[in-house]
Amino acid sequence: MSDSMMLRLSAKQVEFKTKILDDPTVVEALIGGSAGGGKTMSMCIAMMIAVATYPGIQLALGRKTLQGLNRSTVATLLGKVHPMFHIGTNDFHFDKKDGIITYHDGSKITLLALDYEPSDPDFARLGSAEFDWAFVDEAGEISKQAKDVLRSRLGRGIATQKFDIPPKIILSCNPSTNFLRTEYYQPYHD
């Protein structure tokens, strides 16, 4: 990543960075809006800002299925956001088998499928995970339990202690009537 990089953010993306990423009191946030509104792009930019700011940070990136995650979010990250940060193919390694993107400074993004599986109803597959921050794209597709279990795995990564940063979970969604509405929208709009 280039130190002289000049990243141009929209007013909404600057607000997202200032009010969510940079504020240590914000540990959970939901960004919403209609399709094509820039939520995925903003989350991918936020992940790269985290990687550039906190060497060795451990990030989780989840969505209902890995297929959906790779087709949309990872494609945006690698195809659009990496070039914005001057990250070339030699600056990271993408282990597609294990679903881990590793950067030269030791930072990692681990891809997670957060769909309910009858063989793993308690999401035990996340049990030994150690992450600093998590990002969930299209959170309206996952259950509250998936979000809660992922949230419980945050703050265990290297950067949380090394840089004294709080664990954060950032979710994106289109309008939804599931737990996102009752936990994030209604308490502030009723």
Image (cartoon, rainbow, N blue to C red):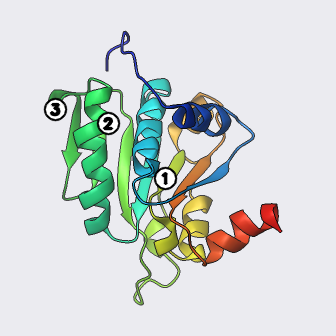
- Secondary structure state at the residue bearing disc 3: helix
Quadrant position of the N terminus in the picture: top left
Residue type indicated by callout 1? Phe
Q: In this rendering, which labeled residue sits more in front, label 3 or label 2?
A: 2
Q: Label 1 to label 2, Cα distance in Å?
A: 15 Å
User: Which amino acid, by three-letter code, is at mark 2?
Assistant: Val
Residue occupied by mark 2? 81
Circle 3 residues within 10 Å: few <14, some 14–19, many ≥20: few
Q: First in sequence: mark 1 or mark 3?
A: 3
Above/below status of 20 relative to 60? above
Where is residue 76 drawn, in percent x and y?
29, 46
Instruction: Indicate which disc residue 89 carries.
Output: 3
Going 32% across and 61% down the picture, which residue do you hit?
69
Q: Which residue is mark 1?
A: 135
* 95 left or right of 178 in image: left
Instruction: Report how far apart the C-alphas of labels 3 and 2 lie in the structure.
Output: 13 Å
- Residue lying at the far right in this picture: please name it: 190
Instruction: Judge left or right: residue 174 versus residue 71.
Output: right
SS for tag 2? helix
Kind of residue sitting beneath label 3: Thr
Which of the pair 177/161 is nearer the observer? 177
- Residue 148, given in percent of the width and then of the height, sits at 61, 68
Disc nearer the start of the sequence (1/2): 2
> Residue placed farthest to the left in the image?
89
Residue 100, above or below 160: below
The CA distance from mark 1 to mark 3 is 23 Å
Whether 100 is drawn above or below 147: the answer is: above
Describe residue 86's horizontal placement relative to residue 169 as left or right: left
Give the residue drawn at x 41%, y 76%. 115
Does label 3 or label 2 sit earlier along the sequence? 2
